[in-house]
Image (cartoon, rainbow, N blue to C red):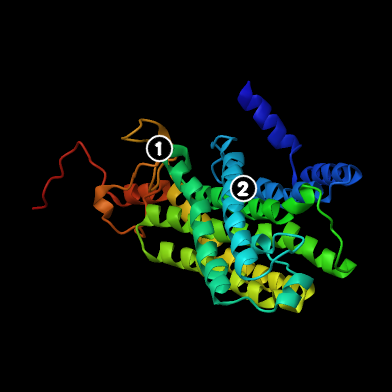
Amino acid sequence: MVERIRAFFDEKRFISPGTIAIAGALLALLSLLSNNAGLAIIFASLVIPVGFLVEISRRDLIKDEPRWSTPAMLAWGIVAGIVMGIIGAAVAAEWWIEGAVLHVGAAGFGGEAADQEGSPGFAVLLLIGIVLPVLGVAFAALGPYWMRRYPEFRNEVMDGVSLGAAAGCGLATGSTIVFVWPLVEGGSADGGSVSDWTALLLGVLVMRPVIFGMIVSFVCGGIWHTAMTQRSVDLLLPVGIGLGGAIVYVFGDLLLQASGTRVELLWHIIIVIALLAAARIVLLRAIAQDRFARSLRGERITCPVCGATTPLGLFCAVCGARLQPATVGNDDTAPIPTLVDTAAGADGAQPETSEEVEPRP
């Protein structure tokens, strides 16, 4: 019954990015009507992450993962974002901007306050620009990595990508909660022009979830990929892009905050474009590895570990155990026999005959 209900909702697509946007807009509107701008921003900050996760979940080749996994990773990322946001806000308030309307150290966009204080000092650049981004991404990636204890999350690279995207979007949402918390408590949102607030909202609600969603998904995708191939390049490339992108993004954002929110928004757009170009490479490699491991054209065999029926490939689609025959060797790039190869081998074999062939005189 549960599977029928799930299939019905998947077919009708009641949960789509469009319906999520409508629901988020309604909640934000109700919050504005109740005179709570901070709560409206928090509700609106969930629209992009949830819509992004719904869309990326449709890219999975295997859709047997529990439905609770993605919301759980989103919640984990929110916790990580709140912790990192509190630390960043405390550091910025202590050594850079004091008395700002919003907690600038949590999500940037200092605006007039950053303009008055000038560029941040060495301690702020080191802690908020380098240390916290690395710790935040690593902390957010711990949740998806913990999910690898379940076999259904070890059978494709896109499991790591989707779980990492959930945790990364949550990381951005958690820092946004800390950023606007003074407004939730009833603080005044006075100050700044319309263009400044527009740039701030676009950066916080749209750009940051996309940026951190891609960054953490790169890191987790690299972990999953190298676990399947045992090649260091499959780990170093996406993890290097993810952590390096996080440092460049936050460090550059700190340096540009005194230039105004519109310049800061332009920096966000540049980072998004660069990460999208990298995401094309990472996702194509992940999907190619999943298709290779699944051997979509191959026959089905019985897994020697769990006993389930699974497509012939490198790994079991149920438990994730290695299926590659010992005769292939340790080279993960070696071709896997398929029905076509089996048929070709059968055609080339000499048929056995029951009749003896008499030797010629």
Give the number of callouts.
Answer: 2
* Picture residue at 37% right of the left edge, 64% below the top: 232
Residue 296 appears in the rendering: no
Name the outermost residue toward the top: 1
| Tag nearer the camera, 2 or 1 | 2
Closer to us: 186 or 111: 186
Residue farthest toward the left in the current orientation of the protein:
361
Residue 249 located left or right of residue 149: right
Looking at the image, which is closer to me, 299 or 236? 236
> Which image quarter holds the N terminus?
top right
60 sits left or right of 343 in the view: right
Residue type of the residue flagged with mark 1 = Cys
Q: CA distance from mark 2 to mark 1?
A: 29 Å
Mark 2–mark 1 CB contact (< 8 Å): no
Q: Nearer the viewer, residue 157 or 73?
A: 73
Mark 2 / mark 1, whichever is N-terminal:
2
Residue 352: x percent and y percent? 23, 41
Mark 2: secondary structure: helix
In this orientation, does residue 109 appear? yes
Q: Residue at x 26, y 55 (%)?
A: 329
Give coordinates of residue 202: x percent, y percent.
78, 62
Q: Amino acid at mark 2?
A: Ile
Q: Position of residue 25 (x, y in %)?
A: 84, 46
Residue 78 got which mark? 2
Kind of element beneath mark 1: loop
List the residue tagged with mark 1. 319
Q: Residue at x 69, y 77 (%)?
A: 256
